[in-house]
């Protein structure tokens, strides 16, 4: 399966190919990349941009070069995951009920709560349902693969969590944070400085969300890095101490993780009122910490696969 440990992509020539076309009708469908036996064409890039723009309207203000980079990264993530997944399954297929669950979690805010809703929504936006279905299927099977491979390596100390909760004065009002992230990996100090400076420059010029779309290697990248609302008490001690000094609109310096670095931004802050329930609180923190650790294992596993593959630019 693995061909080498280098990435051979001639981005300049690919950009030229991309920029000379203005729409799908005028586009000659050329192969831009080949990853193992998976190919990526100009039409794939065009369709991915359309798909991402629907859920990230701020992309409309990006340059063609930036749009190309974002769509390229998004497609490559899916292709690389698909290649690895096919080592473990015979076909890309999941039951509709599992698809329905992920559709609700991703798109319910758009009023999409069924497969039929999604089909109609995509049809109205001239997008192919089967392509989107494959995206969601890859995500579901990948998450299951990560769980099967790494769930036993997740370290959770229930008693420690319980004791930490009981040590603190219990309040009915808790702080919740709306967080976004940019994650990146590096090979050495020079690579770190180069990537970090580029990220800082882009945040200044185009904002955090657009920068996450371009640079982040996290699963949240295609959503502009948005993690969602997190109870402050669920955060690990290191991250909590760092972001406790931040106000909404501010972001942290890079924080080292097991899979690279993460920059966290506080988008908003609010108080939530709920009756204290020790058991519920413990389970909430365990779920958060489990998903956090599995997310880091996912990033590490993906980066290893990507490093071992050759991506050809034709």
Image: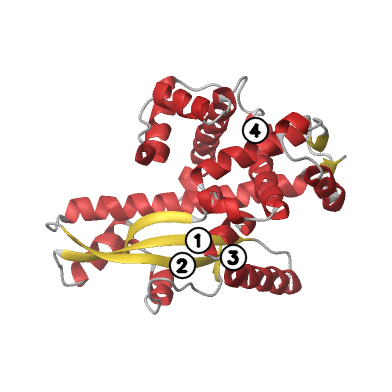
Which circle marks residue 206 in the picture? 3
Instruction: Please report the residue visible at 76 percent of the width from the left and 36 percent of the height from the top.
Output: 42
Up/down of 71 relative to 191, above or below: above
- Observer-side mark, 1 or 3, equals 3
| In-front residue for pair 287/70 | 70
**Which x, y percent locates residue 70?**
65, 50
- Asked whether residue 41 is in view, the answer is no
Q: Earlier in the sequence, mark 2 or mark 3?
A: 3
Residue at disc 3, secondary structure? helix
| In-front residue for pair 223/24 | 24
- Observer-side mark, 2 or 4, equals 2
Q: Residues within 10 Å of mark 4 (few under 14, many from 20)?
A: many
Q: Earlier in the sequence, mark 1 or mark 4?
A: 4
Q: Earlier in the sequence, mark 1 or mark 3?
A: 1
Up/down of 209 relative to 154, above or below: below
- Observer-side mark, 1 or 4, equals 1
Q: What color scheme is it?
A: secondary structure
Residue at disc 1, secondary structure? strand
**Which x, y percent locates residue 23?**
71, 36
Give the residue number, with chain letter if any, for mark 4. 82
Instruction: Please report the residue visible at 60 percent of the width from the left and 57 percent of the height from the top.
Output: 216
Q: Residue furthest bottom?
A: 245
Q: Residues within 10 Å of mark 2 (few under 14, many from 20)?
A: many
Residue at disc 2, secondary structure? strand
| In-front residue for pair 218/89 | 218
Alpha carbon separation for disc pair 1 and 3 = 15 Å
Q: Is residue 15 left or right of residue 151?
A: right
Which circle marks residue 181 in the picture? 1
């Amino acid at each position: 399966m693995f061909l080498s440990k280098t990435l051979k992509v001639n981005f300049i020539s690919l950009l030229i190919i991309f920029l000379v076309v203005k729409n799908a009708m005028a586009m000659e469908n050329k192969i831009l990349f080949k990853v193992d036996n998976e190919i990526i064409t100009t039409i794939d890039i065009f369709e991915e941009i359309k798909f991402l723009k629907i859920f990230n309207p701020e992309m409309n203000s990006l340059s063609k070069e930036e749009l190309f980079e974002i769509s390229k990264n998004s497609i490559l993530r899916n292709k690389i995951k698909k290649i690895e997944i096919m080592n473990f399954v015979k076909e890309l297929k999941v039951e509709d009920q599992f698809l329905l669950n992920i559709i609700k979690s991703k798109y319910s805010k758009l009023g999409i709560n069924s497969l039929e809703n999604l089909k109609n929504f995509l049809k109205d936006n001239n997008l192919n349902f089967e392509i989107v279905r494959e995206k969601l299927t890859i995500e579901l099977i990948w998450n299951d693969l990560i769980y099967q491979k790494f769930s036993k390596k997740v370290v959770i100390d229930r008693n420690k969590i319980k004791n930490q909760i009981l040590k603190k004065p219990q309040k009915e009002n808790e702080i919740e944070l709306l967080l976004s992230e940019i994650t990146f990996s590096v090979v050495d100090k020079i690579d770190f400085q180069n990537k970090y400076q580029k990220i800082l420059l882009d945040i200044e010029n185009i904002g955090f969300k657009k920068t996450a779309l371009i640079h982040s290697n996290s699963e949240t990248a295609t959503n502009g890095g948005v993690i969602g609302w997190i109870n402050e008490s669920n955060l690990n001690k290191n991250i909590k101490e760092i972001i406790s000094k931040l106000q909404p609109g501010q972001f942290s310096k890079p924080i080292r993780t097991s899979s690279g670095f993460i920059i966290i931004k506080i988008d908003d802050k609010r108080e939530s009122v709920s009756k204290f329930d020790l058991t519920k609180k413990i389970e909430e923190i365990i779920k958060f910490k489990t998903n956090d650790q599995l997310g880091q294992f996912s990033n590490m596993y993906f980066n290893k696969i990507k490093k071992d593959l050759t991506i050809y630019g034709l």
